[in-house]
Image (spheres, rainbow, N blue to C red):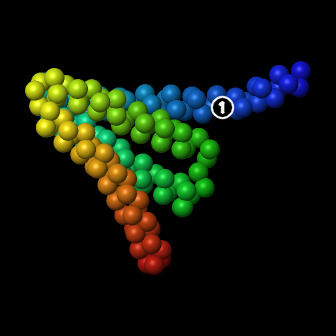
Amino acid sequence: MDAQRRRAAPWQGQWPVIGVVAVGGGIGAAARYGAALLWPTGKGSFPWTTLGVNAVGCALMGVLMVLITEVWSAHRLVRPFLGTGILGGFTTFSTYAVDIQRLIGAGHPAEAMAYLAGTVVAALAAVGGAVTGTRALLELRRRTV
């Protein structure tokens, strides 16, 4: 009996986390779908919407990580809900891969390679800039309070 309990222990208490990730993922995916409806990408066109969604999502992740690791003592479900769920569902690196394939298939290999590299650079710059900017704003706020 003790061996069974020990094997089951890692899952104990994880159902709320799974639940908030699922709900957050649905919200984030719906927001991403909404962005695609508002700013559709034509067949064979450069996927600006996906690039923008991924950059914005990475920037928001940078802000979130600073806030919940350096500013607030967040509830244990905040990071899975907002980070893994909403922002994980919002950003779409699977669509990014499909977009690259579509650009190549449409005879635009140079655009595909620019998109391949540009998305990675934009995502890293967005998260790095958001972390730096959030920390700077928090420091400015601390100095004025």
Residue 45 showing in the rendered view:
no
Task: Describe residue 74's horizontal placement relative to residue 100 as left or right.
Answer: right
Q: Quadrant of residue 69?
A: bottom right
Task: Describe residue 11's horizontal placement relative to residue 114 as left or right.
Answer: right
Which amino acid lies under the numbered mark 1 shown in the image of this protein?
Answer: Gln
At 10% from the left and 27% from the top, the residue drawn is 107
Circle 1 packing at 10 Å, graded few (<14), some (14-19), many (20+), is few
Residue 136 showing in the rendered view:
yes
Element assignment for label 1: loop
Residue 4 vertical position relative to residue 57 in the rendered view, above or below: above
Residue 116 vertical position relative to residue 43 in the rendered view, above or below: below
Indicate the position of residue 43 as horizontal and vertical percent values.
Answer: 13, 24
Task: Describe residue 56's horizontal placement relative to residue 13 as left or right.
Answer: left
Task: Describe residue 113's horizontal placement relative to residue 2 as left or right.
Answer: left
Residue 16 vertical position relative to residue 128 in the rendered view, above or below: above
Q: Nearer the viewer, residue 117 or 126?
A: 117
At 53% from the left and 54% from the top, the residue drawn is 68
Residue at the far right in the pictured view? 1
In the picture, the quarter occupied by the N terminus is top right
Indicate the position of residue 110 as horizontal and vertical percent values.
Answer: 13, 37
Q: Quadrant of residue 120?
A: top left
Indicate the position of residue 34 as horizontal and vertical percent values.
Answer: 27, 30
Q: Nearer the viewer, residue 141 or 13?
A: 13
Q: How many marks?
A: 1
Indicate the position of residue 5 as horizontal and vertical percent values.
Answer: 83, 26
Q: What residue did someone put label 1 on?
A: 14
At 14% from the left and 37% from the top, the residue drawn is 111
At 64% from the left and 28% from the top, the residue drawn is 15
